[in-house]
Image (cartoon, rainbow, N blue to C red):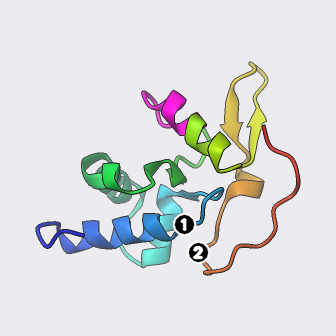
Amino acid sequence: MSEELPAYAERVLEAAERIPPGRVMTYGDVAEWLGEGGPRQVGRVMALYGGAVPWWRVVRADGRPLPGSERRALENYRAEATPLRLTGDGEPRLDMRRARWDGDGGDTARDEGHM
């Protein structure tokens, strides 16, 4: 990470890098895990500096892919076998119950099946 980044941004980006492939944390999860800031602060850091880390693993709580980056996010989710589900309108969304990571350092087995 660059020394030019604000310290909080550095911590948010390091947290994003720790999320295992196929798992996600919400903006609020990251803030809670860090013990500082909130979802908006995490979202701001990701918007400004997140391009160099696996940004698709830090998500909105509703499981919808980041607006404007849906296609790229879905490509990454499929490549990493991140659990997805279809909404009533047929749109893919993260299966938050199965994809959410609690930041414990381990990765428990996910239910089988993904899109």
* Residue 111 location, quadrant: bottom right
- Where disc 1 sits, the SS reads loop
- Where disc 2 sits, the SS reads loop
Q: Magenta stretch containing residue 67, yes or no?
A: yes
Residue 19 is tagged as 1
Q: CA distance from mark 1 to mark 2?
A: 7 Å
Pinpoint residue 106: horizontal percent, then vertical percent: 67, 79
Decide: few, some or many residues near mark 2? Use Cα within 10 Å; few <14, some 14-19, many ≥20.
some
Q: Which numbered disc, 1 or 2, marks the residue that appears first in the sequence?
A: 1
Q: Residue furthest right?
A: 112
* Callout in the foreground (1, 2): 1
Q: Residue furthest left?
A: 4
Q: Where 25 sits versus 37, above or below?
A: above
Q: Is residue 37 visible?
A: no
Pinpoint residue 30: horizontal percent, then vertical percent: 47, 66
Q: Nearer the viewer, residue 39 or 45?
A: 45
Looking at the figure, which quarter contains the C terminus?
top right
- Is there CB contact under 8 Å for labels 1 and 2? yes
User: Which three-letter amino acid code belongs to the residue tagged 2?
Assistant: Gly
Q: Where 115 sits versus 106, above or below?
A: above
- Locate residue 103 relative to residue 84 in the image: left or right: left
Q: Magenta stretch containing residue 73, yes or no?
A: yes
Q: Is residue 66 visible?
A: yes
Q: Nearer the viewer, residue 97 or 80?
A: 80
Residue 103 is tagged as 2
Decide: few, some or many residues near mark 1? Use Cα within 10 Å; few <14, some 14-19, many ≥20.
many
Q: Which residues are magenta?
A: 66-74
Looking at the figure, which quarter contains the N terminus?
bottom left
User: Which three-letter amino acid code belongs to the residue tagged 1?
Assistant: Ile
